[in-house]
Amino acid sequence: MPLRFSDAPWARTLSNAVGGFGAIIFFHKLCALVLTVAFGIHVANLVYRIVARREFSLVWGSNSMVPNLKDIKDFFGNFKWFLGLGPQPKFDRYAYWDKVDYWAVFWGMGIIGFSGYAMWFAPFFARVIPGSWLNIALLIHGEEAILAVGFIFTIHFFNTHLRPGNFPMDLTIFTGRLSEEELKEKHPEEYKRLLASGELAKFRSEPPPRWLKNFGRVMGGAAVVAGIAMLALMVVAFVR
Ligand code: HEM
């Protein structure tokens, strides 16, 4: 955010606190490398599971992130439920908003990654693309960053942590586990399927240890507070 709004007074204060804009760019590039490796591992793992282990359920079906007709029906059904005009849809392994979150980040990675590396290695890219495209890359990179951060700190935070039923936060991202009650309530279709196929016992594990839950609370709390603070700074920079 200080890079994007570098002329805002708070941006200078924030950047001075960590050693100036040079330090911010250094940490930004370091995080970009970590993000690229994480994304690469995710894509390699997907390709391995689909091609080598022939797990086609990742491409289509109830364990897949690919949107289907049920997601469209659930989307409209959920809005009807918001308005008290019908029952809440019965969600499966991934609800439609989980898929929106996933694909927004997936395509966002391509856009932000490509434009980021184009700027990072500008002399090389300027040999293969017109130089003016690098200006466009900066524009796309900055706007995609605002879009991503704005989306994550509003819609994603609300859907996964702040909405009634999950408030103050959903710890599954840190513990990797959820209780049978939660599975039944939040993913009723998946619960029904696992129960019918006798696979439920396969996923049973010990409850997460208290230290892990506390770790999740600290990390999640810090992320929510930092996110809301950044959102406020973003709004200040836009309206000023
Ligand atoms: C592979 C991932 C990424 C790479 C390689 C990358 C690289 C870069 C580079 C080289 C710059 C220019 C720095 C300078 O001024 O010298 C930059 C700027 C910036 N990056 Fe990234 N970045 C990546 C991911 C991200 C992500 C995930 C976000 C936030 C969601 C982000 C937000 C920004 C912003 C806001 C700027 C400032 C843009 C402006 O000045 O208008 N970047 N990035």
Image (cartoon, helix red, strand yellow):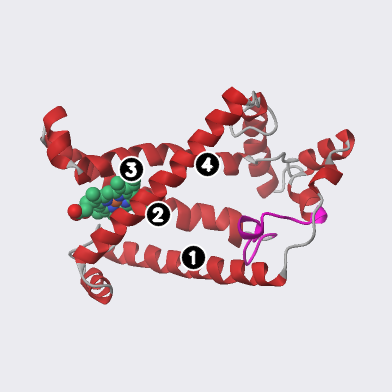
User: Against 215, is 48 above or below?
Assistant: above
The answer to whether residue 129 is seen in the rendering is: no
Of labels 1 and 4, earlier in sequence is 4
Give the residue pinned by disc 1.
Answer: 223
Name the kind of residue labelled 2 in the image.
Answer: Val
Q: Is mark 3 within 8 Å of ligand 1?
A: yes
Marking on residue 149? 2
Taking the spot 24% from the left edge, 65% from the top edge, the residue there is 23
Stretch in magenta: 165-181
> At which x and y percent is residue 124?
15, 36
Picture disc at residue 112: 3
- The quarter of the image holding the N terminus is bottom left
The alpha-carbon separation of the residues under discs 2 and 1 comes to: 12 Å
Mark 2 beta carbon near ligand 1 (under 8 Å): yes
Name which of mark 3 and mark 1 comes first in the sequence.
3
Locate the C terminus by quadrant: bottom left
| Depth order, front residue of 155/196 | 196
| Image spot of residue 186 (x, y percent) | 74, 49
Label 2 or label 1, whichever comes before in sequence order: 2
Alpha-carbon span between mark 3 and mark 1: 21 Å
Answer with the quarter of the image where residue 39 lies: top left
Crowding at mark 4 (Cα within 10 Å: few <14, some 14-19, many 20+):
some
Q: Earlier in the sequence, mark 2 or mark 3?
A: 3
SS type, badge 4: helix
In which quadrant of the rendered view does residue 96 lie? top right
The x, y position of residue 98, in whole percent, is 59, 43
Mark-to-mark CA distance, 2 and 3: 12 Å
Helix, strand, or loop for circle 1?
A: helix
Which residue is denoted by mark 4 in the rendering?
A: 102
Circle nearer the viewer, 2 or 3: 3
